Image (cartoon, rainbow, N blue to C red):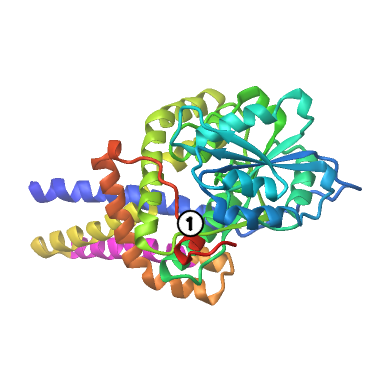
Amino acid sequence: MVALVVSLLLSLVQGVLLVCLGYQVFLALVSVRRPQAPRAPSAPRTRFALAIPAHNEGMVLSATLAQLGQQDYPAELFDVHVVADHCTDHTAEVAQQGGASAHIRDSLPRGRKAYALQWLLDRLVGEERGYDAVAIFDADSLVAPDFLRIMDRYLRAGGEVLQGQHIVSNPEDSRLAAVAAVDMRLNNRLRNQSRRNLGFACRLMGDGMVFGVEVLRRYGWLGETLIEDREQGYELLLRGIRATYVPEARSFGQAASSWRQALPQRLRWYRGVVDMQRRLAGRLLAGALRARSLAVLDGAIELLMPSYTFLLAVSVVNLGLVAGLAWLVPGVSGMLKVGGSALLCAGWVLYPLLGLLVDRAPGWAFQALLLGPAYLVWRLWISVLVRLRPDKIAWVRTRRREEQDGVSL
């Protein structure tokens, strides 16, 4: 009797794992196609405000501003604004020297990027400013010269919220940075490109985001969790606005190159997901039913679906338990279940390889997966830690490579 109950439970787990894997593979296959970009109009006309929230980013900001100054876009159609949020370094001075407008913020609340963004956006979207759109970048972001020209085309074709392709710029720094670069490639292709092809909402990623001013006037900045960008995307989705992925518009940013640097960043991200699940999952499901919207339902599925790390771990544990049960209660059916569990586990193991093949990734990306087992165990430990001690996790600024080397760009 006990063996039967355990067998039924394991079958249920297998069913959930199979459905999740099937959905992920479906998205991977859908992402193969890349739709054509809107045709280039005769001349750009969108007036952009480029917003950069910064906390003690003086060492990296100058390179970002210099890169933005090289945009292949009429200089009179964009301005750069930096909010120096509770800075104790020379961020404001670097912003001014780089030709940007420096906005010094020392008011409460503090401790989250969302607060600085909302404060700055309130000052940029007024009628008197005359901006048509706001592009948001990280302080270490290196933006491709054609970024604004590409976004201008999408905005004039009807786009309201756009997300460019974010690329990790330093995969050569360490094996961890290389794995982070692979992770970002998979996010771009499997999460965002697939949803672009399906007409669903892509995931906002914090850097390289563009918002039509009317959207910001109507709703403001709604994200308040530790991953406010992704939350903003879900909040807008609930209001009928879908973010569109624009892979041609590229920005480059650094990934943490050591486990010690990456730990607080990952803790923050995982804590933000927990907070969003509590705040938004029910609303997304209810919104999907009310509007009969597959796009909103997909948003709910993405938010509620456990991470790849967790699902792979469960598939490995499931295989071990099924094999143990087959050994205790031998029989043909038991061996078939072991075979099915092994195939399911192999599917989860090979899924990242499928993503890299679809993305036509270079050889170094496949080599980076050799660190995959250690990386996945680390991420699994972080997810457990977040659930055990959620109140102990707060926003911590990520240290940049320039600070470790002691040099300025």
Residue 192 in the image: above or below residue 170: above
Q: Please indicate whether residue 333 sits to the left or right of residue 240 in the image.
A: left
| Residue type indicated by callout 1 | Val
Q: Main secondary structure of the magenta part?
A: helix
Quarter holding residue 53: top right
* Residue 203 coordinates in the image, percent (x, y): 55, 44
Q: Residues within 10 Å of mark 1 (few under 14, many from 20)?
A: some
* Residue 30 appears in the picture as rendered: no
* Secondary-structure class at tag 1: helix
Q: Evaluate whether residue 241 shows in this view.
A: yes
Residue 397 on image: x %, y %: 44, 47
The answer to whether 177 appears left or right of 322 in the picture is: right
The foreground one among 293 and 393 is 393
Where residue 242 appears, as percent x and y from the top left, is: 62, 36
Which percent across, then down, holds residue 120? 61, 32
Badge 1 is on which residue?
Answer: 25
Q: Which residues are magenta?
A: 332-353
Residue at 45% from the left image edge and 55% from the top image edge: 399
